[in-house]
Image: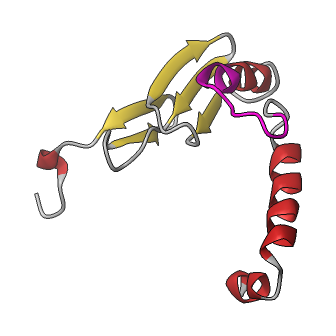
């Protein structure tokens, strides 16, 4: 459905709309500036000052697990090169790496 709606939009209008929404959703990233890894850590630290005890992001594609004041920050990395993923077991949030021995059917 969304793809059909975007077919009716001129690309310039679609990019403007996405850019406006995208940058207002992420206050650490200002328009036309790229976010660096440190921006994600700062963002997570701000979130962890509240009621959350964990923050999981994936946009940077760099696997990272940090214990910060108030909780854990995880950047998922990617599935193409790092094979990393996050698991929450009900008590702890952890970044893990897929091993072939864990594959389907084993």
Q: Quadrant of the C terminus?
A: bottom left
- Up the image or down, 7 lies above or below 34; here it is below
Q: In the visual, does 102 lie left or right of 89?
A: left
Q: Nearer the viewer, residue 58 or 3?
A: 3
- The reply to whether the magenta stretch includes residue 32 is yes
Spot occupied by residue 20 in the image (x, y as percentages of width and height): 89, 53
- Up the image or down, 85 lies above or below 68; here it is below
How many marks overall?
0
Q: Residue at x 83, y 81 (%)?
A: 9
Q: Quadrant of the N terminus?
A: bottom right
Q: Residue at x 18, y 49 (%)?
A: 102
Spot occupied by residue 29 in the image (x, y as percentages of width and height): 79, 34
Image-quadrant location for residue 104: bottom left
Q: Residue at x 60, y 38 (%)?
A: 57
Spot occupied by residue 14 in the image (x, y as percentages of width and height): 82, 70
Q: Nearer the viewer, residue 96 or 2?
A: 2
Q: Residue at x 62, y 13 (%)?
A: 68
Image-quadrant location for residue 49: top right
Q: Nearer the viewer, residue 84 or 17?
A: 17
Q: In the visual, does 66 lie left or right of 36?
A: left
Spot occupied by residue 46 in the image (x, y as percentages of width and height): 79, 21
- The reply to whether the magenta stretch includes residue 22 is no
Q: Nearer the viewer, residue 57 or 90?
A: 57
Q: In the visual, does 8 lie left or right of 67?
A: right
- Up the image or down, 45 lies above or below 75; here it is above
- Up the image or down, 16 lies above or below 13; here it is above
The residues colored magenta run: 30-41
Q: How is the image coloured?
A: secondary structure
């Amino acid at each position: 459905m969304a793809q059909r709606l975007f077919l009716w939009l001129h690309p310039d209008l679609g990019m403007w709309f996405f850019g406006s929404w995208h940058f207002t959703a992420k206050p650490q990233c200002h328009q036309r500036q790229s976010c660096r890894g440190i921006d994600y850590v700062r963002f997570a630290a701000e979130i962890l000052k509240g009621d959350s005890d964990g923050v999981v992001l994936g946009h940077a594609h760099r696997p990272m697990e940090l214990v910060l004041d108030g909780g854990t920050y995880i950047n998922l990395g990617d599935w193409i090169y790092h094979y990393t993923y996050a698991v929450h077991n009900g008590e702890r949030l952890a970044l893990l790496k897929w091993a072939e021995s864990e594959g389907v059917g084993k």
